[in-house]
Image (cartoon, coloured by chain):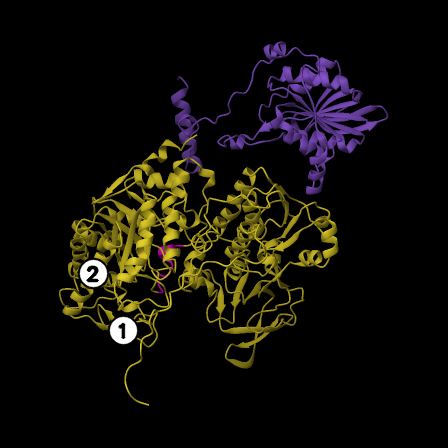
Amino acid sequence: VGRDPRHDILFEPIQIGPKTLRNRFYQAPHCTSFGSDVPGAQAYIRAVKAEGGWAAVNTEFCSVHPSSDSLPLVSARLWDEADVERLSLMTELAHEHGALAGVELWHGGCVVGNLESRLPARSVSQMTDESLYSSSCYELDKAGIREIQRFYVDAAKRAVSAGFDIVNVHGAECGAITQHFLMAKFNRRIDEYGGSLENRSRFWVETIERVREAVDGQAAVTARLCVDTLNDSPLGIRAGEEAYGFIQLADPYVDFWDLQVGGWVAAEWAGDDVVASRFAGEFSHREMIAAASAATEKPVAAVGRFTNPDTMAEAISSGDIDIIAAARPSIADPYLPAKIEAGRYDEIRECIGCNVCASRFPQAAPIICTQNATLGEEYRRGWHPERFTQAQNADRDVLVVGAGPAGMECAVVLGKRGMRRVHLVDAASEIGGCMRRIAAYPNLGEWGRLTQYRQVQLDKLDNVEVILDTRLEADDVFEYGAEIVVIATGSRWRADGMNGPTQSTIPGAEADNVFTPEEVFDAGGSIAGDHVVVYDTDGYFTAVAMAQMLMGAGKRVTLLTPFPNLSPYMFLTGEAFRVNRELRAEGAEIITNHALLEIEGTTLRGCHAFSPAPLEWSADSVVLVTQREPIDRLYHALKAAPDRLAAEEIEAVYRIGDCVAPRLIADCVFDGHRLAREIDSDDPATPLPYRRELTPLPATLPDLVGSGA
Amino acid sequence: VKTVVAVKQVADLDDLDGEPVRKRINEWDLFALQAALDLGGEVVAVTVGDPGTEEVLLQCLARGAERAVRIDASVADPLAVARLLAALIERESPDLVLCGTQSSDAANGAVPAAVAGQLDLARVAVVRGLRLVDDRLELDRELEGGLMEQVSVALPAVVSVQTGINHPTQPNLRAFKRADKTPRETITPQQLGFDVAELEAAAGARVRRLVRPGAGESRATMLDGDPAEVAERIWEIIGARVPA
């Protein structure tokens, strides 16, 4: 059984100037925090995608010069030959797997801190970016403009010598000087580089033209353009108007277009270029992309968090776009094209749109994925998303207790590693663990894909049995007959208000009008009282979900948090702005910078984060979203009886996921995967060391010259 | 009581793309086996198939069957299967024969009736409850529309069991380990007195390959839109096919 013929269109090669994409799958530039300084990880993450069938793989944004130094955020760099050498590893491996390699040339203008290079920021106009404190920039004069264009040209030449097949002039996400010239928001010039649409386009068009000359037919040239800044501001870009004009002006100099919508950097747009599943599904910017792409006959690539081949095929056959660009879908499943090509649709590991991948970029931390535990681990741990080795101890039977994110993943990987029998046992009547609740939170339905993918995998593995409606106590585990026992019993919310900011419980938390998130969920939001205070010291999605559920049940909700912002983690995932906006629009009151210290009846006592002066609020009920605690009773009961374990011939008891320490879902999936990958190591409880990419010590040490004290 | 439970390894119809197609024990048979275990006494699991079908016998042993017998023959025709089973059942002379009401792959539901016919025994189908009262079996049969029929039969008898009659227990790994060590019996059609050539000739239908119709061959169409639009479309489709 092959693929549906309707999807054949996705596998038609397409010419992009001097190069050919072997199919329509284009891994759009996306951040990894590997840049060019962590070349092994950079090369391998892209190589696995190339192997998985992507016709092109791209770097993340790639700085053209030290005057665009993104630290602490990690970009790739093409500043000199050392960077060329490091990025060559990526192009080489991409080519080995038959893919083209692309690089996204970038100068950040006024949005860079230049924390490493210590150069002052240069900008279109003397406009200060909101993301930098007490730092501004200088306006480029004509010579300065020429100099920046030279940076692009020199970097483009280096890109060709590094083996890149596609040179992308980045002008999108509101974080590139090229786009700043285009936008009236940043461009207040009165010379020929400012004012009219044609003038504002001049720098960008000239730069693309010069890059085209520089690569001299050795690479395809594209431009990533933000076609709509989504801000309803006259200072922004509208798809059918300015973007249409920009595309017409630069069209002769590109081989294809890479179009996107929204931005990451500026607060008002943040997150809209990687719109989370809680806000939108596949190809949600379609109208804007179609309006802009009407301006060109050249092939158009656009992202849309595509995971469904039907949507992809229709996007192409309708003529709206020609190339399926994808960042997050390629992160969740590097083998997405190969699986569609082979008609292995049920094997697709669909992106859940949680944006935990994106959350790593502002933390300058290596990229991770909730769905794909191997992401970012290709080089340093040698993990391949689709390949597994037979375990050395595959003759053992394994019992996994708890079918949440960690337990499901562990059982799947143990199954793929050929363990004789794996029993995944859960007390509930379906698998998923905490995901049974979380995926039913308002707007988080797509997160259910985490369970759905694993359900399909578990069904396919003959050596894995899923046993539901079965609660195992320590005696049951002792007598179960497994040589290896893995405990994955998850976590629960603290009911006593224990929280990080005060490291204390909250007196009064035991009262009948104080609820945990589990209780609110089980009641469908219909808890006692009309006015409910949700107290959040967790900082991620749970408090938001509680507020939405309670409001859905007709409650008046006040969100109270000691943090300076509600759900600070959502600033990392790019969800914060819209979530804050929507909660307020729906009538939620949000009080930040205040700690809750005590509950007495309907009186809540606390203080401001910076003042001990007592304050009071009132509410009928309180929901405490403070912190979770591991459910580890079973684990400790087993570990406390080593003689019994020995007598029952249980070789090892491990614990994974939230029952070790409550964490991000992605970290729990990773934990389960990691244990299964290393189930036959000398000490599976302790992760094997990973390869570190360290810069070698200098051969000779420089002298510090000069005289003085 | 001594009960023979006839079990079948079925193809997982959700996995026809699998290479090879995934096989598992017929879901109905798990309920039949559990019913036998709940009655107590000796439980003998029997299947007809090649050595690859022993996995279902292992499942039965792990679940508590005392013995497991495979009749070594690759036949798919319900009547041929029934003849083989009947011959073995005659040898075992049980008090009761339990089967699943149907198999999830072929869904003929023919074997239990054919076995009863071969052995000239009473046969009760689609049973949702059974109780041993003295030397008779009292049974609840499922009828259409939620109706139930109560029947009482003398033993031995052939009873086919509906899903949901009980809660099959899931054996733990220790039970599988024990089952691994329990010898499984194999018997050939010749040992049961069959002429192989004759059986071959009588085997009738056999499964050569399991395939899912390709997407291009599908004649199903999904209709999108609000109820009024969908109704309109349905009307058009019917109109185009029904002569005026």
* Mark with earlier residue (1, 2): 1
Q: Main secondary structure of the magenta part?
A: loop
- Which chain does the purple colour mark? B
Q: Quadrant of the C terminus of chain B?
A: top left
Q: Is residue A27 visible?
A: no
In this view, A601 is above or below A637: below
Q: How many residues crowd around disc 1 within 10 Å: few (fewer than 14), some, or many (20 or more)?
A: some
Q: CA distance from mark 1 to mark 2?
A: 19 Å
In this orientation, which residue lies closer to the viewer: A34 or A393?
A393
Q: Amino acid at mark 1?
A: Leu
Q: Which mark is residue A443?
A: none
Circle 2 marks a residue in which chain?
A: A
Looking at the image, is mark 1 or mark 2 nearer the viewer? Answer: 2
In the displayed structure, does residue A656 sit left or right of residue B188?
A: left
Circle 1 marks a residue in which chain?
A: A
Q: Amino acid at mark 2?
A: Asp
- Outermost residue, left side: A192
Magenta-drawn segment: A267-275
> Does the magenta run of residues contain A689?
no
Residue topped by disc 2: A154
- Which chain does the yellow colour mark? A
In the displayed structure, does residue B117 sit left or right of residue A246?
A: right
Residue at (52, 66) in percent of width and height = A559
